[in-house]
Amino acid sequence: MTTTAPGPAGTASAGAGPAAPRRLPGLRRAGKAGRTRKTKRIDGPQQRGMMRTALLFLLPLLAFYLVFYVFGFVFLARTSLQRTDLSFLDPESVGLENYRLLFTDDRFIRALLNNVVFAAAAVAGALTLGFFLAVVLSTGMRGRKVFYAVFLVPSLMPVALVASVFGGMMENRYGTLNETLRSAHLDFLAGHWLTEPGLAYAVVIGIFVYLVGLPIMYYTADLSALNTSLLEAAVLDGASFWQLLRTMLFPLMRTTHKTVVVSILLMSFRAFEIVFFSTKGGPAGGTEISGTYVYNYATSPGPRVGYASAAAVVVLLLALLLSAIQLRFTGKSEE
Amino acid sequence: MAQVMLDQVSKTYPNGHVAVHGMDLDIADGEFLVLVGPSGCGKSTLLRMIAGLESITGGELRIGDRVVNDVHPGDRDIAMVFQNYALYPHYTVARNIAYPLRLAKRPKDEIDRRVREVAAMLELTDYLDRKPGQLSGGQRQRVAMGRAIIRDAALFLMDEPLSNLDAKLRVQMRGEIARLQRRVGTTMVYVTHDQVEAMTMGHRVAVLKEGRLQQIGTPDEIYRSPANTFVASFMGTPPMNLVEARLRTGKGGTEVVLGGVDVPLPAAERGYPEGPVTVGVRPEHLLDASILGDTARHVRIPAIVEYVEALGAEKNVYVTLGAIRGDATSAGAPIACRFPAESAVVADAKVELALDPARIHLFDAESGAALR
Amino acid sequence: MAETSDAMRVLTGRKRDRRILQGMLLLMGAIWLFPIYAAIKRSLEGGGTGNYTALFTDPVGDVTIYDTYLNSFIIAVLHAGIVVSVGALAGYAFSKLHFRGKEALYYGIVLCLAVPGTAILVPLYYTIREAGLFDNYLGVALPEAALTLPFAVLLLRNFGDNIPDSLIEAARMDRAGHWQVFRTVYLPLCRPALVNLSILCVMWSLQDFLFPSLLFTDEKYTTAAKAVQSFQQYLATSPSDIGKYNASLVLLAVPALLLVVFGLRFITAGLTSGGVKE
């Protein structure tokens, strides 16, 4: 999965890829050169001038942050303590009641858990399948460009679209999957993909794994920068392809593994469309994830917006925590 | 151990560029062969073809008694040291050295024992637990050697292994590698662009240019009788002086005019037809007549000193031949001479050079091939 | 180049391995293409290619396929324009200016990379409504830009930090003000990064379902991504329209597909930038 998800939207866009800042030069610099340079170079009045200039350049960005993040978070936190609907008229203050309800709702807990499970499956898929495909594609196989596109393009399409196609394909009676299985006389494999709890779960995982394009992209980029003489040395030392994978390539891609893991985890919070357009969270909330949970409450009629906000606050805190941990360790691994 | 035979081996890239032209080379069992040439001469490509890292597009390559053109590099029984050492950054020194044996699934105690032996031989025992990133350049170089040695491979290939070391270490490692090769006795092909390494390390030297073999022979042969002007000017610092001149028949037999002086050629070199020729003289064969004393066999040639490089033990003196500056015969680069330190020459002064005609090399003026 | 590919080829050198790998690749490729095959196959059920042409001529709900393309395009351009201009200004400050608290601020900005769109849905709804931007292209482009800006800052700083300070200083010595330096030195040098960034913005806009679905109430603003849902409501319910619905899915993929096919180089460069520079 990658990643990226989707962009913005729900995905935020940014996400995506981004999410995985592989290198944060800025942070490193903060600690070292940057600071000394700064102090050396600048003195009082000049610095004040510099500050003013910097503020001017940052003004538009700060305006965006103030409106969408700072105000947004405050508003969200306030709403999470209220009982209200999307008109936001006559909110009724309910204290921490929304949070109490939230943490006693099995579906919410399950949604968070599903987030983790789906992300874990996607990580597993990326570290094995994604890694493997990237390596194979880097070795100059015939048709590599076509294959690369086949694996990558679905990850760059609107997720809503991909999930809808999966949903249609998995449909019980007319779905292409079951039709194909039946025509191949494999009827026993045809199943109620979207309505049987275990199968529906598997379908969602399947979509997560299907969107393995961005990890492949990251690995490919890393592989193309790899010092090939290392691999040549290992080949001459007698390593077979499979031994190379295990003893050289996998350990050498360590930084990229981290990037992939973090980007998938973050992406799983945004992977709302994957579920929304395939199983719709069903059956019976079995495949619900945090994104669909919040969305469903926020958009359902009735005064449930406060409750949705409380759920959003929890999700937000988890995502930010994850991001902070990641920034820490990218910042550090630089040295 | 094995001998290596190249029979018309060539490499043509898909874009039509020919990196190696039909190359014939026989490398004897236990021999240390140095491939030398300027960058782009195809020496590294040739080495990588022997290793199997580049495909061979023509000819036949034999290692031992089998043709290996299509044998996977891992099955050729070759150990190679790369220019950047190619140490596995995620493994310790011990694991790096042990890697080939572990892949071969050798028993653990044998691996341990061999790693320790090799580490002792290369003075790496104290560093076995370090990662490559924590080692100095010279230590890394030795780890790379260790990984090659431990395999008991039939053939060692080295691709400019010393070029990333500083000058002092390079001198030291030059000796160590040559000694090591004598000790283990494995056939070795060593690529370098450094003519000093070529001269000092191998049993034989193969000089390459633009994908073609120019000359192969012992360092001595290459130095003393270069096959053409390219080899002559590639080996030696400063390189051999090459001067355009004319052969003619004078009273003393065949002679050549240098700096306005008729230099009679020794008997062996007579009998070439008159006409243009390239004359080659090594700097150390142009002597300072003023400190030479009287000798009959030397011819004296007037010259003007352009500049002097005092190196301590000796002086490189660059001169223009002829009694006056701007003499027509002196067009072109200054002539280098190597004088002993006690020579008193100074820039812009006149000097008399002494040359033993037997030291003169003659090359065809057009093809550059040696006339012998 | 020839050499590199040869070098990597050595990895799979043995013929048997190579054949196995080629086989696995084919198998995986077939699996990955199956959903596409499924969509195309079903899109021809019922009306054949007529399913496609009908979508261009007969509006579904209020819109034709063309309208959704146009709506998506307008939002994508707005989104890219906002992100590139705001991001470039901020990137200059973070890369080339020195001021107190810079690193802390940068850290805070980049931290918001992690914010999921669903989590700020409620405040967004309120803000856009209060700003009177419902059913306005800007009302969707602005929140999209807000979510993309942390990435933009990250990307541009990674890029900008590699522009030598000496260039900026030389211009300053020539008495250029920061605004001039920004316009005449920084912007031209950042062009590759800005191009990558804008292509990514367009791609993310095309992917965005959430904001258009929430912030547009009038159907005529339906974007290609949102149409996935609205067309489903109109078409997927009756079995006779199922072919048409699948045809619409295929057509809705076209803008993103074109972008990815022609812009893959920029997308890859943008997403992997910051990594793999050495």
Image (spheres, coloured by chain):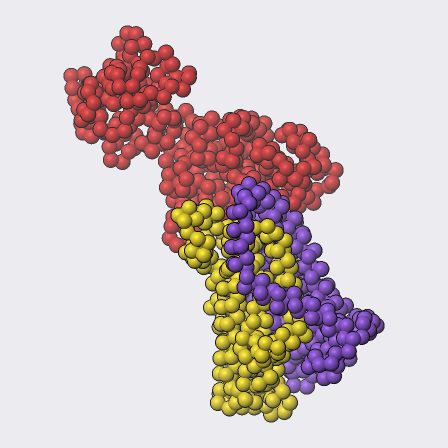
Chain colours: A purple, B red, C yellow
Q: Say which residue appears at 74% left-offset and 78% top-offset.
A: A91
- Residue at coordinates 73% horizontally, 69% vertically from top-left? A77
Of residues A71 and B109, which is closer to you in this image?
A: A71
Q: Is residue A80 left or right of residue C220?
A: right
Q: Is residue A94 visible?
A: yes
Residue at left offset 26%, top offset 9%: B296
Q: Is residue B307 above or below residue C7?
A: above
Identity of the residue drawn at 68% across and 81% down: A87
Q: Specify the quadrant of the image occupied by residue C16.
A: bottom right
Q: Is residue A100 left or right of residue A78?
A: right
Where does the image place residue B359, in percent across and percent down from the top left?
31, 20
Quarter of the image with the C terminus of chain A in it: top right
Q: Return the residue nearer the eye: A100 or B217.
A: A100
Does residue A326 sit above or below C34 in this rendering? above
In the image, residue B346 lies at what x, y percent? 30, 16
Asked which quadrant contains residue A161, the reply is bottom right
User: In the figure, is residue A42 to the left or right of B321?
Assistant: right
Question: How many labels sit on residues?
Answer: 0
Residue A4 seen anywhere in this rendered image of the structure: no
Please provide percent x and percent y for residue A14: 59, 65
- From the image, which quarter does the N terminus of chain A lie in? bottom right
Q: Nearer the viewer, residue B76 or C122?
A: C122
Q: Residue furthest front?
A: A45
Q: Is residue A23 above or below residue C59?
A: above
Seen in the picture, residue A328 relative to C226 is either above or below; the reply is above
Residue at the farthest top position: B294
Left or right placement of residue B360 versus residue A141 in this view: left
| Percent coordinates x, y for residue A117 in the rendering | 74, 66
Q: Nearer the viewer, residue B361 or A33?
A: A33
